[in-house]
Image (cartoon, grey):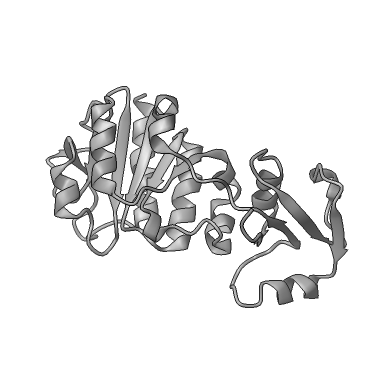
Amino acid sequence: MKKPFWICGKHTVIAAINNPKRQIVKILVGKNFNTDLIQNKNIEIKDSFFFKKLFKDIDINHQNIAALVSELPERDLKKELDTIQNALILESISDPRNIGAIIRTAVAFDIDSIIIQKKYFNQTSVTMLKTASGAFDLVKIFCPTNLTETIKLLKKNNFWVIGLENKGTKNIFQYKWSKKNAIIFGSEGFGLRKLIQENCDELLNIPINKSIESLNVSSAVAAVLSIYKSKN
């Protein structure tokens, strides 16, 4: 097992405890925390100052609960393709709060898998995990090194690959979704790289007020997935 790391927040910790693939080393809670919420006997009671000290380098609401946990094992996309129906692909998105918010939104709208480039992903990010509010432990996450090859693999296995781009020829309300989809979102600053666009089956846009150039990427994901869920 790799070196364990600390996570915090009620939903984050409880989801980790309930994930059989996690190893839970230690659980810490504040004096007034309802321990009935935690089905685990390895609990230590700490005062609020302890939590402030533990997460002193992070601006985060720890909610007086933390756990020392293992990393989740890496997943093999090729071996799990048959279990995937709806996937999100994050291209060059690195902000942990955005990634966490996207993971939470994806689970809320029944997306079963998220694909994100390995170089942009850190599963031990306390900020990302807290923002995901427990959703991280409820979805399959794959971290390939080569996104273009991953897209080609998905297309060979009957996925329709959709890129979100301001210059997309169709908007999300007009589009007729297929049964198996991989939806790609690019970075806020640059959108989808040209090579990624060229490998998409379709490029869609989100019709918004022209006085606003674009949406935050996590907001864009929420907008697209709300439409996607309503049509599937």
Indicate the quadrant containing the C terminus: top left, top right, bottom left or bottom right.
top left
- 85 left or right, relative to 39: left
Asked where in the image residue 175 lies, by quadrant, the reply is: top left
Viewer can see residue 72: yes
Viewer can see residue 206: no
> From the viewer's perspective, is residue 113 above or below residue 143?
above
Expressed as whole percent of the image width and height from the top left, the position of residue 224 reads 33, 41
- 154 left or right, relative to 123: left
Expressed as whole percent of the image width and height from the top left, the position of residue 12 reads 64, 51
Q: Residue at x 64, y 41 (%)?
A: 21
Residue 230 or 47: which is nearer the viewer? 47
Q: Residue at x 55, y 47 (%)?
A: 136
- 28 left or right, relative to 222: right
Q: Residue at x 34, y 32 (%)?
A: 228
Expressed as whole percent of the image width and height from the top left, the position of residue 163 reads 23, 43
In the rendered image, the residue lying farthest to the front is 1
Expressed as whole percent of the image width and height from the top left, the position of residue 109 reads 46, 36
> From the viewer's perspective, is residue 190 above or below residue 221?
below
Residue 2 or 155: which is nearer the viewer? 2
Asked where in the image residue 157 lies, by quadrant, the reply is: top left
